[in-house]
Amino acid sequence: MERRGARSALAGLRGHEIIEIGAPEWERLRTYIQADLVGVVVAAAWLTALRFVVVFDDWLIAIVSLLLVMAAFLVRAIHMIHRYRRFAAVVVFATANWVVAILVTAIVPFALATLALAVLLPVLVAVQHMNHARLSAMLGATMLAGTALVVVGRVYGGVGVAAPAPVTHALAIVFIPFITVLVSLAAWQNHVMLVARAEALQESRARLVAAADRERREIERNLRDGAQQRLVAAAEQARLAQCLLATRPDRVGPLLGRLSDDLQEASAELRKLAHGIYPPQLAQYGLETALRAVAQHSPLPTTVNAVGIGRYPPEIEINIYFCLLEALQNATKHAGGQATVTIALLDRNGLSFDFRDTGRGASPAHLRAGDGMINMNDRLGAIGGTLTIDTRSGGGMRLHGHLPRSALESAGVRRSTREPGRAVRAALVGTWQFIARLYTGVQRTTHPHPQRYIAAGLWTMLGFALGAGALALLGYAATGLRWSLAAAAGCGVAALLILVTLRLLRRQRVERAIAISAAITWCFALGLTAMVPDALPYATLVTVAPVLLSVAYLRRQRFKLVMACTVGTAVAITLAGRYLPGIGLGGHGREWLVDLLVIALVVLGFTRASFLAWQNHVMLVARAEDLQESRARLVAAADRERREIERNLHDGAQQRLVAAAVQSRVAQRLLATQPDRVGPLLGQLTDDLQEAGADLRDLAHGIYPPQLAQYGLETALRAVAQHSPLPTTVNAVGIGRYAPEIEINLYFCLLEAMQNAIKHAGEKATVTIDLRDQDGLSFDFRDDGVGGSPQLIRSGHGITNMYDRLGAIGGTLTIDTSPGAGVHLHGDIPAGALPGTPACGR
C-alpha cells in the first residue's frame, strides 16, 4: 500500500512503498492510530494554551506531558506496524490509552466523561485483528481498565485543578463527540470488513481455482509438446533401426547412439518437469533443504539463512516453498543480472520468511497487477498467513511472509516454547469469560444468533427504563418538580416501546428492531443525563451501543445513518450533562449514592460495549470461516494433485525412459557380438516406447483433457462417458462454449461424480448427466446405484471438492440421496456468474 503525505514521516523516512497484499486491514489500523495521534496532539496543544492563558496551574503541564508520552507510544505503535509487529502495536496502542486515561482522570476527575470512551477504543480497533484468545484477554483488560478509570474518577478527588466551568464545558463538548467519531469509525471499519473479508476470500478462492487450472493446462502442454513428442520420435527411431538392421546394419549403431542420447535427454527433461511440479527434496528433507537446492541452481547469487526451522505439515511446506520459488523467479526476471538474493526463514512466535533482493525494485501499481504476487498472497492466506511487500525504485524488494503460531497449531504443529505473559493473559481471558457469563447468562458460541444479542440489550434497557422511572417518581415525591413526573412518564413510554421492539424481534424483523432500539437507547441516554448529569460517562457508553450493535446486521446506507445519529446524540448528551442541573440526587450528603450509581452504571456500560465488540468479532470470524476453510481445502487439493502427478511421472514414464535408454545402449553393444539378439530387443524397445507414450498421453489427458479445450464441455463429457465402465448417457440442451474456468470446473465436478459412482454405486448402476443452459448453466447427475447416507456423502473429499469448485465460480451444489435410491447431484451457476455470457455463443 502506498504511503501518502504525513504517513510516510510517521511510518519511516526511507521512501519505500509498502504494499500489504495479505493484510490490508493493517493499513486501516495504522490510519486509525494516526487519527488518535492527531487528537492527542491537538489536546496537548489546547491544554498548553490553557495553561498559559486561562488556568495557571502546573498540573496542566503534567497532563500535557502525559499526552506527549502517549503520542510517543502511538508513534512507536505505527513503527511497529511498519516492522510487521502488528499485535504488539495493538497492545502498545491499548496500554497507552488506558494508562494515560487513568492518570489524567486521577489529576482532573471531570475528564472521566471524556475518557470513558477512550478506554473502549483499543478493543474496538482490535476486533478485526486478533484471534479469540487474544481478544478475550484484551476485553478482560478493558473491563479492568474501565473499572479503574471510573473508580479513580468518582472516589479520588483529584489534585485540585480549578478550571473555569466554560473551559471544562468546552473540552467536553469538543472531545466527547470527537472520541464518539473515533468509536463510530472503528465500528464502520468492522462493518466494512464484514463484507470486504468475505468478498476478498471469495475472490481469492476463485483465483486459486483458476491458478490451479492454469497449472494443469501448462503441465499438460509441457508433457504433450515435450516428453510425449520425444517418445513418439524415439519409437520411430527404434522402428527405423529395426528396419535398417537387415539392409543397412552399419547405420544402426550410430542411430542407436543418438536414440540413447535422446532418451537420456527426455528423461532429464521429464525429471526436471516432475521436480518443478513437486520437488522430492521437499517431501524427504523439508523446507530448508528444498530451498537450498533451488538456491544452488538459481542464476542469481542466493543465500538461505534458517533459524529454528524444522519439519511442518505438507500444506505449510509446499505453500511457503512455492511462494519463495515465485519470488525467486520474479527476481530472476526483473531484478537485473547484478542483483543478489537473501532468503531468511525464522520460526519464532510463528513461521516467517524474509525475501530480499538488491535489484531495481518495482512500481507498486505493477506489483498489485501482477499475478505472481497475488498468487503468493492467496497461497499464504489459504494457510492463515499474510504477505507484505516493501519496495522502492532502485532499492530492491523485500517480501515478508508470516504464519502465526495459531495457524501452525491449527495444522498440528506444537512447539514447547514458554510464551511470556501467558499467566497474565490466561487471567484476563478468565476475567472476560466470567463477566460475559454474568452478563448473558449463557455460554458464548461461535455462531451467534442476532436476536439473542439484541434481546439481551433490550431487556437490559427495559430494566433501566423501569428503574429510571421509579427514580424519577421518587424525585417527584421528594422535590415536587413536575419535570420529574414527566421523566417518569417518558420512562414508561420507553418501556412500552421496548416491549413492542421485543415483539418485532420475535418476528425476525431484525433491522426494524435495531432501529427502534437505537432510538430508545439514545432517548434513554439523553433523559438519564438530563436527570443525573453525573451519569454522563455512562451515557456516552450507552450512546455508542447502537452503532456497535448495527455492525453485523445493517446495510451500508442505514449504518451510515446510525453513525450520524450516534455523533448527534453524543453532542446532545454532552450539552445536557454540562448545562442542565438535574434532579439533585447528590444533595443532602448523598454524594456516595451518586458515586456508587455512576460506578455501577459505567462498569455495566463497559460490559455491554465490550460484549458487542466480542459479538462483532465472532461475526467476522463466522462470516469468513467457511470461505477460509474452502480456500484451504482447494490449495490442499491442488497440492495433493501435484504430488500425485509427480509420483506418476517418477514411477511411470520416467522409469520407462531410463529403462529404454539402457535397452538402446545394450542393443548398440550387442551389434558387434550378438547381432541376432538385436532385432527382438529393438522390437521390445519399440513396444515399450509406444506403451510409455500411451501412458504419458493418458496422464496428460487426465490432467487436462484436450477435447475440453478444443471442443468444449459437452464433447469432453461424452468422451469420458464412452470410456466409463458404467453405462453413461449425456444429454445437453443449449450448451455452447464458456469461459475456460467455467468449463474446467464443471468438467472436473462431473468427472469426480462419475468416479464416485464407479467406486460406490455398484456394477449394475447406470449414470445420466443432463446439461442445460436456461437462465444460467446447470447440471443434473443421477445414478441408480446403492445410494448412501447424506451425511456420509457430504463428508467425503470428492463431494467437498465439488462444493469448493462450484462455489469458487459462483455456483451451488445440492445432493439428494438415501440408501437404495441412488444419488442425485444438482449444480447450478447463475447467468450473472458466467463471465463473457454474451460472447459464449449461446
Image (tube, helix red, strand yellow):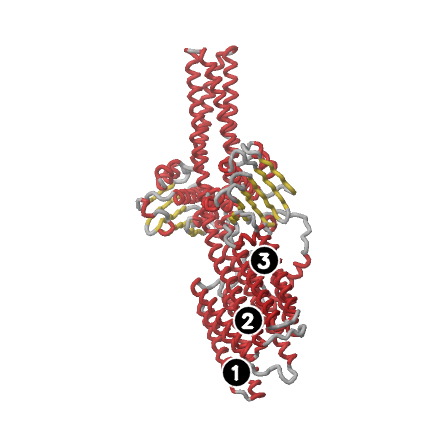
Q: In terms of secondary structure, where does tag 2 sit?
A: helix
Q: Please give the residue where the numbered disc 2 appears in the rendered image.
A: 540
Query: In the image, what residue type sits under mark 1?
Result: Ala
Query: In the image, what residue type sits under mark 3?
Result: His
Q: Nearer the viewer, residue 483 or 667?
A: 483
Q: Residues within 10 Å of mark 3 (few under 14, many from 20)?
A: some
Q: Residues within 10 Å of mark 1 (few under 14, many from 20)?
A: many
Q: Is residue 786 visible?
A: no
| Residue 82 percent location from the top left of the image | 57, 51
- Residue depicted at 41% across the width and 37% down the height: 705
Mark toward the viewer: 3 or 2: 2
Q: Is residue 207 visible?
A: yes
Q: Label for residue 120?
A: none
Q: Please give the residue where the numbered disc 1 appears in the rendered image.
A: 488
**Seen in the image, is 719 located left or right of residue 137?**
left
| Residue 141 percent location from the top left of the image | 63, 63
Do callouts 3 and 2 mark residues in contact (Cβ within 8 Å)? no
Mark toward the viewer: 1 or 2: 2
Mark toward the viewer: 3 or 1: 1
- Residue depicted at 60% across the width and 41% down the height: 344
Q: Please give the residue where the numbered disc 3 appears in the rendered image.
A: 132
Where on the picture, by quarter, is residue 315? top right
Q: Residues within 10 Å of mark 2 (few under 14, many from 20)?
A: many
